[in-house]
Amino acid sequence: MNGKLPATLSAYRLLSAAATPLAPLFLAHRLNRGKEHRARVRERRGEARFARPNGPLVWVHGASVGELVAALPLIERIAARGLSVLVTSGTVTSGGIAEQRLPRGVIHQFVPLDVPRYVRRFLDHWRPDLALFVESDLWPNMVLEASARGVPMIVVNGRLSENSFRRWRRLPAMIVNLLGRLDLCLAGTPADASRFGELGAPRVITTGNLKFDVPGLPADRAKLMELQDAIGKRPVIAAASTHAGEESAVIAAHRRLRGNFPGLLTLIAPRHPERGNGVRELAAAAGLKAALRSRGERLDAATEIYVADTMGELGVIYRLAPVVFIGGSLVRHGGQNPIEAAKLGTAILHGPHVWNFAEIYAALDAAHGAGPVADAGRLTAALAAWLNDPAACARAADTARATVDALGGALERTLQSLEPYLMQLHLRGRADDA
């Protein structure tokens, strides 16, 4: 796309460039808060720790854990074609998941801050031949610089919430200019496709949600068996991806339930593991014995609250508990992904604030594979109902799994849409090798 940039985009470019001297202070502040990887901060300045591989390079970017996990099967299929793949993300947690789960040979780097100098340094080194942006993490300088280099850019698993849509509509010239630089937008739902189209994306196709095609979360067998042995036949409930304000509701539910369900164990996996100690303190203040997994504290017969403040272990948690409350939903966050729990045969409870995954939760609720709860009291009642009726809990879990499985197929549709681009890169790679 040629021509003069709109005033809003020009202003953004000028301000982000002027802020370059402040970027080290910003990164230092994030580092002190545990939001940057100490040994890899230079990547946020666009500096690479690996050489660029020879041949065509596909760049896949996802903001955080959810986007990265959704893209894993797609990354695996692209790498299996012999193409080199660079994956970028922006959070420490996503970096840990990348180390654990990316296919051998796929490179991970933290995405640079959206500062022109850093973005140019990043692109000058990696020289991607195709850029795939997962969901909607489109940074203006990154898009503009990639466009200036002629890099084809495609949104995959495109998602645009109603709130994001309304925010972008306040800057119409800016978003039209950015989206107009995309080659293709592969949207997750018809509603997402409509919103992208209204904002100016020129070619929009609804391919479905890649998260439905992600295999069940892995679990370390030895760790799983160790915890199963420690738990024995105790009744177990779980709360996963919880946010501040939700753990207190879960702990309150545990206190009300433990009299009717002797030996009850509650597993809590906070969305941000660094909050683990605070969760333990909440449990202690409620008079409950808690153990912190990150510190190797033992789960024994007296443990009532086990805080799984570690990365990459939700696969273990979901295999241990027949019912799980998915967080980010009692507070106004928008909900966390329920698909992973459903795939592993866990019945699901969630709060009312699930707009980030509205279609998925609506399908699960309609099929009775998940249950909405409005507050701590209703959470307690719903947990009690399923603890009292394991058969009903198992039926809900089976229904959740079937619902998610029936919504699959996005991976193949996405690959079909990407095929012309991937084939061109494959042929170019063969020509370079000849």
Image (cartoon, rainbow, N blue to C red):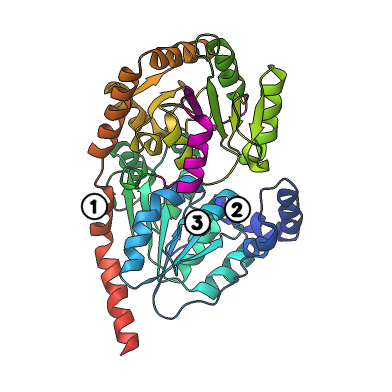
The answer to whether residue 370 of the structure is visible from this angle is yes
Report crowding for label 3: few under 14, some 14 to 19, many 20 or more residues within 10 A (C-alpha).
Answer: few
Magenta-drawn segment: 217-245
Q: Amino acid at mark 1?
A: Arg
Q: Is residue 220 visible?
A: no
Which of pointers 1 and 3 lies earlier in the amino acid sequence?
3
Name the disc covering residue 100, or none: 3
Q: Is residue 352 above or below residue 413?
A: above
**Percent position (x, y) of residue 350?**
44, 23
Reply above or below: 288 against 103: above
- Counting residues from the start of the chain, the first of labels 1 and 2 encountered is 2
Residue with the mark numbered 1:
413
Q: Which disc, if any, is residue 12?
A: 2
Query: Image quadrant of residue 43?
Result: bottom right
Residue closest to the eye, 365 or 134: 365
Q: Is residue 124 above or below residue 157?
A: below
Pair 1/3: label in front? 3
Determine which of the numbered discs, if any, sits on residue 28 in the image.
none
Label 1 neighbourhood size at 10 Å, few (<14), some (14-19), many (20+)?
some
Q: Are marks 1 and 3 in contact (CB under 8 Å)?
A: no
